[in-house]
Image: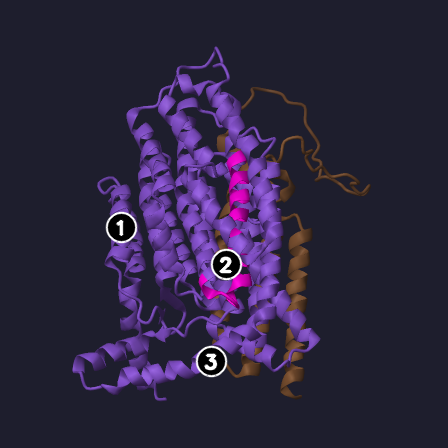
Chain colours: A brown, B purple
């Protein structure tokens, strides 16, 4: 396979990865998946750069890829830290919860058209309370076993 | 070339570069010191504020124009061409370090990072400042990306620094999400441009682009790829500048983060992003004067010391004579690239300015209002860059003057926005509120602060005899020079529009009656003095603006 055909193949793979990441970034609502998509965009860029580096016979592309990986790790660390604080506050990874700050007279985004077979979460049966009410354990209240 | 040769060259290059880089090195040292004080549990004994203040003051002293290492031949390449060191770098670096000093004092007075959080906040602030210095001096797409990230990542954390508040976390989230997305898009643009042009070194890319355009070898497809790559890089810079349509994070982050962080984001981040935009635009729209690599700098000084190489200067002169003709023809060949950049940037400037001013109308929260005001101001500050692009081919001096107008406005803007957010922070401490309505009748309580705030707002509008007027005058005259009449008319109309919402704040503070059930407000002496000290330069620069203007003009002298 000649060089330019090889380059073209890799550029297509890179563009696909980037495009998938971009679409995922715009369409997903789970915060972790959003940041994963952002990482996927960066991987598409890395494929591109390595392919171009080989085509031009230049190590510059690979060098930039190493830097991209490092910076992506830093960004992911900050992003996950933010996600963690937010999760502690709301107990959910849905990004649509975080819309308190917006323009005045701008209605909040609410889910319309929830599909009919959507089941919220498993409903546990409730027992009639009896006996002495136990003291609330703060740790138990703040701890969430499930996402 | 053998390995030892490479290492030798690297050593010479690094040693030749460090002298010009010492301001940043001092900043690095300060960051390490603050972190070490945290590690060894010295925070109770060592106040990180003093470390920060001393560090940034020393950096300012070492990097400022008074003690500067003259860039050899007007512009000099540092670290194998990754950075460029010229008077433009010196100007923006001085601006950033000066801002770091003022900012440290401001945080001390307003008391927002408390003693516990102070080391973290100052580390983040200094780290971001370091990234911004690199933004202003980057000469390589690797540095463009790295410096944007170095400035952004600490800013995400700073936006969420008030850990207990829900709004603060929301601000950090919105900033980080937006930043991650735009960083990816910018990198894709970098990969396209670097791939097609076969280099990431900005001046080399400009030369390659000129060669491609000269030989008319550009197929339609390549043309599109280059344009797309350029636009994608501009997306990343527009995010840092909060230019429309990449401004959505700005009002929310400003509302959620504390006023101190807002001051940092709106002044330092914006000035650095403007410098970066200028660098990238010049990189693709014009061929810079060939910069001297640091290896050669070191060698020249060695040969001068030895006083043996008599032929060296004449040889160098002969070398520069031939590229001169080549350079002018290359600059001519780059006309389509300049035209493209000028159109895109002029359009961005127009919509940024108009949108910012219109959206600021209905705001009730002072921080949101100031956020839209910074968006509009970013629009004004982008305007000289398309003007410079239009002028670069025909009249390099006028193009330099346009860039100088941008640099001058960035310098004035430092005082205006730092002052405005300082007032917001001090009033928040006194009133516990950031609603404009709560500022009613404040003139009877703290007249000095209200008068200063009014002066700052008048300067933001651009009324004479304040410094904001001179900045706008320079910007608009560069537009006249470039015959960008549409931009000029819309800029003028925008100034008129902005009058209303700035004056509304002044009116509420001075004319409106005081609410009856308000707790007595009093600002102590020190905050008032600080605000007055920040406002004073606006008045002084409004009348004696020649010095700063000369400094800005000399900063832009070597760009074209």
Which-is-in-front pick, marks 2 and 1? 2
Q: Residue furthest left?
A: B306
Mark 3 or 1: the one toward you: 3
Q: How many C-alpha atoms fall within 10 Å of the one at disc 1: few (<14), some, or many (≥20)?
A: many
Callout 2: 10 Å neighbours few (<14), some, many (20+)? Answer: many
Residue at 54% across, 27% down: B504
For the record, the magenta segment spans B369-397
Depth order, front residue of B317/B13: B317
Determine the chain carrying the residue at label 1: B
Q: Is residue B69 left or right of residue B258?
A: left
Q: Nearer the viewer, mark 3 or mark 2?
A: 3
Q: Would you name the residue on which mark 2 appears?
A: B277
Q: Are marks 3 and 2 in contact (CB under 8 Å)?
A: no
Residue at the spot x=65%, y=75% of the render?
B222
Q: What is the CA distance from the residue labelled 2 to the residue labelled 1?
A: 28 Å
Give the alpha-carbon distance from disc 3 to disc 1, as whole Å.
46 Å
Same-chain check, marks 3 and 1: yes
Q: Earlier in the sequence, mark 3 or mark 1?
A: 1
Residue B515 is left or right of residue B116, and the answer is right
Q: Are marks 2 and 1 in contact (CB under 8 Å)?
A: no
The chain under label 2 reads B
């Amino acid at each position: 396979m000649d060089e330019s055909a090889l380059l073209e193949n890799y550029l297509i793979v890179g563009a696909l990865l980037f495009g998938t990441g971009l679409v995922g970034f715009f369409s997903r609502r789970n915060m972790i998946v959003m940041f994963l998509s952002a990482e996927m965009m960066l991987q598409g860029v890395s494929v591109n750069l390595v392919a171009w580096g080989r085509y031009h016979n230049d190590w510059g592309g690979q060098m930039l890829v190493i830097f991209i990986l490092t910076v992506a790790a830093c960004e992911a660390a900050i992003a996950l830290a933010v996600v963690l604080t937010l999760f502690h506050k709301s107990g959910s990874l849905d990004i649509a919860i975080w819309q308190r700050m917006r323009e005045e007279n701008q209605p909040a985004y609410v889910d319309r058209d929830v599909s009919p077979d959507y089941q919220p979460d498993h409903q546990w049966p409730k027992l009639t309370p009896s006996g002495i009410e136990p003291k609330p354990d703060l740790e138990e209240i703040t701890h969430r076993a499930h996402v | 070339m053998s390995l030892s040769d490479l290492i030798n060259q690297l050593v010479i290059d690094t040693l030749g570069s460090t002298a010009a880089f010492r301001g940043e090195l001092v900043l690095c040292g300060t960051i390490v010191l603050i972190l070490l004080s945290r590690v060894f549990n010295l925070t109770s004994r060592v106040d990180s504020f003093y470390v920060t203040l001393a560090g940034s003051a020393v950096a300012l002293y070492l990097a400022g124009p008074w003690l500067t290492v003259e860039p050899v031949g007007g512009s000099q390449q540092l670290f194998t061409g990754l950075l460029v060191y010229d008077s433009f770098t010196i100007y923006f670096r001085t601006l950033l370090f000066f801002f770091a000093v003022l900012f440290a004092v401001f945080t001390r007075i307003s008391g927002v990072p408390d003693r516990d959080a102070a080391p973290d906040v100052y580390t983040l602030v200094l780290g971001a400042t370091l990234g911004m210095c690199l933004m202003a001096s980057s000469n390589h797409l690797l540095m463009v990306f790295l410096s944007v990230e170095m400035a952004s990542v600490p800013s995400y954390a700073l936006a969420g620094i008030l850990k207990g508040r829900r709004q603060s976390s929301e601000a950090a989230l919105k900033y980080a999400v937006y930043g991650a997305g735009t960083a990816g898009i910018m990198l894709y643009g970098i990969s396209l441009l670097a791939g097609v042009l076969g280099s990431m070194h900005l001046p080399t890319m400009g030369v390659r682009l000129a060669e491609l355009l000269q030989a008319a070898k550009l197929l339609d497809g390549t043309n599109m790829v280059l344009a797309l790559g350029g636009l994608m890089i501009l997306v990343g810079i527009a995010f840092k500048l909060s230019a429309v349509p990449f401004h959505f994070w700005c009002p929310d982050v400003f509302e959620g983060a504390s006023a101190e962080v807002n001051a940092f984001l709106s002044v330092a981040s914006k000035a650095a992003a403007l410098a970066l935009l200028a660098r990238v635009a010049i990189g693709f729209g014009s061929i810079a004067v060939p910069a001297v690599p640091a290896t050669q700098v070191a060698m020249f000084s060695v040969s001068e010391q030895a006083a043996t190489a008599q032929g060296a200067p004449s040889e160098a002169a002969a070398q520069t004579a031939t590229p001169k003709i080549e350079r002018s023809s290359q600059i001519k060949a780059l006309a389509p690239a300049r035209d493209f950049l000028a159109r895109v940037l002029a359009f961005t400037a127009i919509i940024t300015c108009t949108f910012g001013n219109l959206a600021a109308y209905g705001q009730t929260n002072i921080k949101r209002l100031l956020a839209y005001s910074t968006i509009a101001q970013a629009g004004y500050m982008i305007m000289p860059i398309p003007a410079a692009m239009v002028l670069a081919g025909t009249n390099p001096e006028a193009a330099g003057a346009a860039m100088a107008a941008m640099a001058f406005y960035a310098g004035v803007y430092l005082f205006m926005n730092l002052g405005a957010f300082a007032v917001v922070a001090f009033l928040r401490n006194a009133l516990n509120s950031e609603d404009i309505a709560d500022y009613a009748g404040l003139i009877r309580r703290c007249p000095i602060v209200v008068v200063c705030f009014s002066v700052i707002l008048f300067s933001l509008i651009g009324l004479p005899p304040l410094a904001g007027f001179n900045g706008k005058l320079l910007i608009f005259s560069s537009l006249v020079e470039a015959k960008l009449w549409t931009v000029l008319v819309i800029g003028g109309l925008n100034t008129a529009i902005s009058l209303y919402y700035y004056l509304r704040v002044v009116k509420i503070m001075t004319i409106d009656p005081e609410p009856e059930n308000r707790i007595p407000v009093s600002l102590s002496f020190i905050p008032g003095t600080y605000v007055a000290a920040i406002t004073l330069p606006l008045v002084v620069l409004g009348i004696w603006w020649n010095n700063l203007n000369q400094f800005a003009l000399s900063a832009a002298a070597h760009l074209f």
